[in-house]
Amino acid sequence: MVEEPIILEEEFNLSDSYTDPSIVKANIINLLYNGKDRIRLRFRVGYIEDVIKFYYNILPNLSIEDLDRGGVYSYLIPVEGLEAKSPKLIMELSSVDKLREYSSELSDIFIGAYDSSWHIGGAHFTVSFVIYNTGYYYYSFGGDGGSGSHPKLVIGVPDDWDNDLEIKKHEANVVKMLVDRIGGNRDFMFMDESLNLLYSVKWGKDKRISYSRMVIDILNNLISYKVCPLGIFYTKSRDISRTIVSGGVDLDVMISDKLIFDRILEVGERSPLFKVFNSVLDTISLDLYTFYLKLGPRNILRVEFPSSVLNFMDLDDIHIAVYIDALRGFGYPYSLMRAHEMAVLNYEDREAIEDALADILGIPPDLSYSMKQYSKWWSVA
């Protein structure tokens, strides 16, 4: 298996004169074309079809015990047949206008969503502070709904403060309040995050365990109310290729999952259900399932959820809920877009917060930041 990247680099010659910045882009383009033969040889046309053949021929016969699980990666083992799946209703919902025709059939679906952001004053602001803002949105086809955000400011941040942990605590409080507003027969909570937690592997053990426990507490709280938590996100993961290789097949190129499923799924179809395995999930009590859903050409979402969800929620209902919300968002779940809109703090928002804090503390505007920061903002004459 070829894992080494293609590295394109010319000999570095230090310039003794000023170079026009426009030359930089031209040099990079030339570097690409100088390496075109190596690129084409490695990523040859038709290679994805070879990987898809392995997908159909190898994956159905694998179990987690068959895999050589080296390194920090995720692996997907199918728990269904590999044929594409789609409820009948999905094929009839070809546009957002069609949703109105089926409003009675969808009236008991209730979808909530939340997203978070934070802003730190930074080392050059006179006073240390952080603001957390968790935005939320919820609606039902029965007509109920709402949106808003819950901010939290910390002034004088301790040295051992950890924003990853604190924002998760903040989200947990928002979820507890939000779950009381969700009241359909098919209830969902959409989260723009990966539930497989593989990103936390770079953290220290204590932090990773603390964070994982908070995530599991949020999931268990939702499940206790029979609300289905769904991690919904775009990913560049190559879990399918990684699983095939770990099962003993030699691949020259690790094709991303989204390229595979963009090729084999039609719009509205989902992949089979997979069980997710990785080194973080091995150490916590989270049995995780996932599938990929095609919303349009080159528009592939990954959907993750705890396996215990299927004790009270039908898999087709999960499929339908994500798909109809993406129809409302013209290609991306509308609820997640609205929650993000409530959560995000843009430049003007952050500047206004800093100005207000400086005003409260009686700090003149020209003393709010260090001279080093101001020097970065000054234009060069």
Image (cartoon, grey):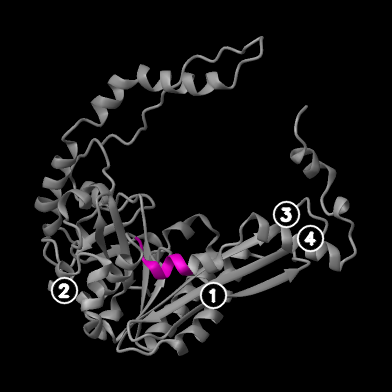
Q: On the image, which quarter does residue 330 sit in?
A: bottom left
- The image shows residue 349, relative to residue 19, as above or below, that is below
Residues drawn in magenta: 332-338
Q: SS at mark 1?
A: helix
Question: Would you say residue 301 is visible in this rendering?
Answer: yes
Neighbourhood count class around disc 1 (C-alpha, 10 Å): few under 14, some 14–19, many 20 upward: many
Dot 3: few (<14), some (14–19), or many (≥20) neighbours within 10 Å? few
Residue 89 tag number = 2
Of marks 4 and 2, which one's residue comes earlier in the chain? Answer: 2
Helix, strand or loop at mark 3:
loop
- Which residue is identified by label 1? 171
Q: Is residue 191 visible?
A: no
Q: Amino acid at mark 3?
A: Gly
Query: Residue tagged by mark 3?
Result: 122
- Give coordinates of residue 276: x percent, y percent: 29, 64
Whole-percent x, y for residue 263 in the image: 18, 48
Residue 128: percent from the left, percent from the top? 77, 61
State the SS at label 4: helix
Q: Which one is earlier in the sequence, the residue at label 4 or at label 1?
A: 1
Camera-side mark, 3 or 2? 2
Element marked by disc 2 = helix
Assign the C terminus to one quadrant of the image.
top right
Q: Nearer the viewer, residue 215 or 134?
A: 134
Q: Residue at x 52, y 86 (%)?
A: 177
Left or right of 36? Residue 216 is: right
Question: What residue is pinned by disc 4?
Answer: 355
